Structure formats: structure tokens, C-alpha cells
Image: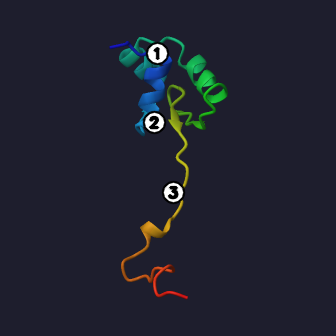
């Protein structure tokens, strides 16, 4: 089994809905350059990643994958809603 690169590990982690900070990247994936990985994911993989800067006694970056709003399909309709394709013409 091929070992995933740090970039692939961070990408998978974000796609699972997690947020990540530089300290988490170091502890989980051994990455000292999370900012560079995020830059690559944004530009080469065209991922929409947002930066949630945390402030307080210490300021640090926290990254999250921006979730696209779910598009409603006819399969998501409520059961009591009439299916537009039933009943003929």
C-alpha cells in the first residue's frame, strides 16, 4: 500500500470535514509547512479552502474546506410533495 504524501493526507483530512491548524498538521502528518500545502491545494487542486484566523493571546491559522451548498434534486423532495413526472400528460 502506497504511503500518502503530506499534501494528500491534508487533502483527505479536509475532505472529511475537519479543520486543521499548523500544530495539528505537525502532530498528525509531520508537516512543518501547512501554509505551503494549503497554497498548493488551492491553486493546483482548485480546492476552495477558507482561512479561519483565530485571535486572542496567540494568533494562528485554521483552515477548512468550504462546503458547497447542496443542490436539491427530485429525489430530495418530501414524500407528500407530488412528483412532477407522475400522472402523465
Identity of the residue furthest to the front in this view: 89
Q: Name the residue under label 2.
A: 15
Comes first in the chain, label 3 or label 2: 2
Q: In which quarter of the image is the C terminus?
A: bottom right
What is the C-alpha distance between the residues marked 3 and 2? 15 Å
Residue pointed to by mark 3: 70
User: Could you tell me which secondary element the residue under label 1 belongs to?
Assistant: helix
Residue 49 image position (x, y, % from top left): 58, 35
Image coords of residue 84 (percent x, y): 51, 80
Q: Residue 37 carries which label?
A: none
Earlier-in-chain disc, 2 versus 1 = 1
Asked if 73 appears above or below 21 in the picture, the reply is below
Counting residues from the start of the chain, the first of labels 3 and 1 encountered is: 1
| 53 vs 4, nearest the viewer | 4
Furthest residue toward left:
1
Q: Image quadrant of residue 43?
A: top right
Foreground residue among 13 and 45? 45
Q: Which residue is drawn at 51% across and 57% down?
A: 70
Secondary element at tag 3: loop
Above or below residue 45? Residue 85 is: below
Mark 2 packing: few (<14 Cα in 10 Å), some, or many (20+)?
some
Label 3 with label 2: CB-CB less than 8 Å? no
Q: Total of numbered circles in the picture?
A: 3
Pointer 1 residue: 6
Amino acid at each position: 500500500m502506497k504511503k500518502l504524501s503530506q499534501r494528500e493526507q491534508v487533502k483527505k483530512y479536509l475532505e472529511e470535514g475537519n479543520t486543521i491548524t499548523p500544530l495539528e498538521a505537525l502532530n498528525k502528518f509531520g508537516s512543518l509547512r501547512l501554509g505551503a500545502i494549503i497554497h498548493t491545494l488551492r491553486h493546483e487542486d482548485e480546492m476552495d479552502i477558507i482561512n479561519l484566523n483565530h485571535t486572542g493571546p496567540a494568533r494562528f491559522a485554521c483552515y477548512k474546506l468550504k462546503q458547497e451548498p447542496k443542490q436539491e434534486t427530485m429525489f430530495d423532495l418530501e414524500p407528500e410533495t407530488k412528483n412532477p413526472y407522475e400522472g402523465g400528460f
